[in-house]
Image (spheres, rainbow, N blue to C red):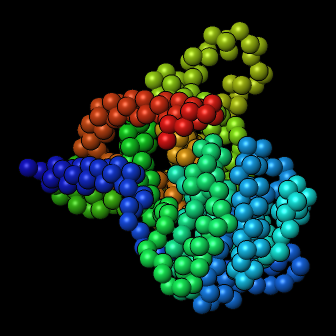
């Protein structure tokens, strides 16, 4: 068996294993049995200008209340928010020495603070520590895993922290779109739990933490799946053939030159993949910040559902073709052909610039080409990549985590590129044809999954909570 065929079998086995592990890990982000987790320390400022930190309560039990109370207020959330605030006031009245801290996550910097609004709307007398947290949410970002429930922000969330600073109780009271989860935590129950912790009678942990560690593997697997797009692979094969032809006067397919060609191709594939991944990383930073403003919107589920269904349909028949009869009746915009030629010329110049950089450094040239390719290729596979972006918007994660998620997604998306670039041009073409044959079926199955996911999202808007 030729060495390139052996390499193909090895790479294929590794790719298949990565996909299977990633798909399994997508459903394994939550552990069934969890141990108490140390509460992240933070410092803040109370409404009367006093500085405090969580470490000030070392050796004492703390009730941490994380919520979002601002103007305008989520109407369907108001009952849960007001009820929980009322129970916390009762807790303070019944147990004046309780260490109660409210962290109010504000998205609207022009709104009055949550303490003032609570007193105005619900007649609450806030006599405990109350701190506001604004973008970039330096406090709330540390507690994302605790406030997150099935991909969304639980508003409010109650945490019990023991004398050792460990979170031993997590109660997701309410979530927009899902309704009551653990429900309002009444004052007598909270008081009993605090006193049990003070007496040292508490054992184990209540509630669950949503960890994102394994999700990185899941995003890597999703990147591999989306790379099977025939459009994407066909463009990649043509581009790499063009590069290799431009850089050599003969095809390096004989055994004597195969080793050096394969090594150089490997570096080209790795650098190209990193270039694409960097673009995804930057996109992830912006998408995660966008999620702060839209994930709690009442219309997010409906809008996301409609968009996902449209993208799923686009996998089978491009939306542009479906709308072609309508577009044909509209007056043509002046200069459309010139604009198209200009955009095409820009991409050609970008590719030529990258090829020019190859003369100085193979790695830099391929990296630059990966960046340009990620920017210019987006319309080709938008139906496959956009679902990952919608999922990212719906998550309560920091901008850096969002960037890392899409970076790993981009690396996974580049996995098929590496063997195509590594092997000889003739074998790379055959390998690409095999990917195209398999990828057609995989992409159609993925399109069906996108449509189903979109319908589930839309159903949540109408009150049907299917997950």
Q: Residue at horizontal 65%, vertical 56%?
A: 184
Left or right side of 294 for 145: left
Task: Point out residue 192 in the picture as x, y percentages from the top left corner.
Answer: 59, 73
Q: Residue at horizontal 71%, vertical 28%?
A: 338
View extreme (left): residue: 1
Who is closer to the viewer here, 294 or 463?
Answer: 463
Res 76 → quadrant: top right
Task: Point out residue 170 in the picture as x, y percentages from the top left corner.
Answer: 55, 66
Task: Point out residue 428 in the picture as x, y percentages from the top left corner.
Answer: 29, 44
Q: Residue at horizontal 71%, vertical 52%?
A: 80
Relative to residue 121, is residue 306 depicted above or below? Answer: above
Residue 385 visible at all: no
Who is closer to the viewer here, 169 or 260?
Answer: 169
Who is closer to the viewer here, 449 or 63?
Answer: 63
Relative to residue 196, is residue 69 depicted above or below? Answer: above
Task: Point out residue 253 in the picture as x, y percentages from the top left corner.
Answer: 22, 49
Res 284 → quadrant: bottom right
Residue 212 visible at all: yes
Left or right side of 169 for 427: left
Tally of marks: 0
Who is closer to the viewer here, 387 or 15?
Answer: 387
Q: Residue at horizontal 67%, vertical 12%?
A: 326
Left or right side of 328 for 25: left
């Amino acid at each position: 068996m030729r060495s390139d065929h052996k390499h193909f079998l090895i790479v294929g086995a590794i790719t298949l294993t990565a996909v299977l592990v990633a798909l399994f890990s997508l459903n394994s982000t939550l552990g069934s049995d969890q141990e108490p987790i140390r509460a992240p320390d933070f410092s803040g400022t109370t409404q009367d200008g006093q500085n405090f930190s969580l470490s000030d309560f070392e050796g004492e039990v703390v009730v941490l209340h994380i919520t979002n109370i601002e103007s305008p207020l989520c109407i369907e959330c108001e009952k849960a928010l007001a009820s929980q605030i009322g129970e916390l006031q009762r807790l303070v009245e019944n147990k004046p020495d309780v260490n109660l801290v409210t962290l109010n996550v504000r998205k609207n910097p022009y709104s009055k603070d949550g303490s003032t609004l609570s007193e105005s709307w619900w007649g609450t007398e806030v006599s405990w520590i109350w701190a506001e947290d604004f973008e970039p949410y330096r406090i709330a970002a540390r507690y994302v895993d605790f406030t997150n429930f099935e991909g969304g922000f639980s508003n409010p969330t109650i945490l019990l922290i023991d004398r050792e600073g460990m979170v031993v109780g997590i109660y997701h009271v309410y979530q927009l779109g899902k309704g009551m989860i653990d429900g309002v935590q009444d004052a007598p129950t909270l008081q009993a739990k605090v006193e049990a912790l003070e007496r040292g009678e508490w054992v184990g942990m209540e509630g669950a933490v949503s960890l994102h560690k394994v999700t990185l593997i899941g995003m890597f697997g999703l990147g591999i799946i989306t790379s099977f797009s025939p459009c994407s692979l066909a463009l990649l094969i043509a581009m790499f053939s063009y590069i290799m032809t431009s850089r050599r006067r003969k095809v390096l397919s004989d055994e004597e030159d195969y080793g050096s060609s394969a090594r150089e191709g490997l570096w080209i594939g790795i650098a190209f993949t990193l270039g694409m991944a960097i673009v995804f990383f930057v996109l992830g930073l912006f998408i995660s910040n966008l999620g702060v403003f839209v994930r709690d919107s009442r219309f997010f589920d409906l809008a996301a559902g409609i968009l996902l269904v449209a993208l799923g349909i686009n996998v089978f028949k491009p939306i542009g073709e479906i709308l072609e009869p309508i577009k044909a009746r509209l007056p043509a915009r002046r200069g459309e052909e010139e604009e198209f030629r200009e955009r095409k010329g820009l991409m050609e110049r970008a590719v030529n610039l990258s090829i020019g950089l190859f003369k100085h450094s193979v790695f830099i040239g391929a990296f630059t080409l990966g960046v340009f390719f990620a920017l210019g290729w987006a319309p080709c596979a938008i139906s496959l990549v956009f679902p990952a972006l919608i999922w990212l918007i719906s998550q309560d994660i920091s901008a850096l985590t969002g960037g890392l998620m899409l970076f790993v997604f981009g690396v996974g998306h580049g996995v098929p590129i590496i063997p195509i670039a590594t092997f000889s041009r003739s074998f790379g073409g055959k390998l690409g044809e095999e990917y195209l044959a398999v990828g057609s079926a995989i992409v159609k199955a993925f399109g069906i999954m996108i449509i189903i996911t979109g319908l589930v999202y839309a159903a949540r808007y109408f009150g049907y909570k299917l997950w």
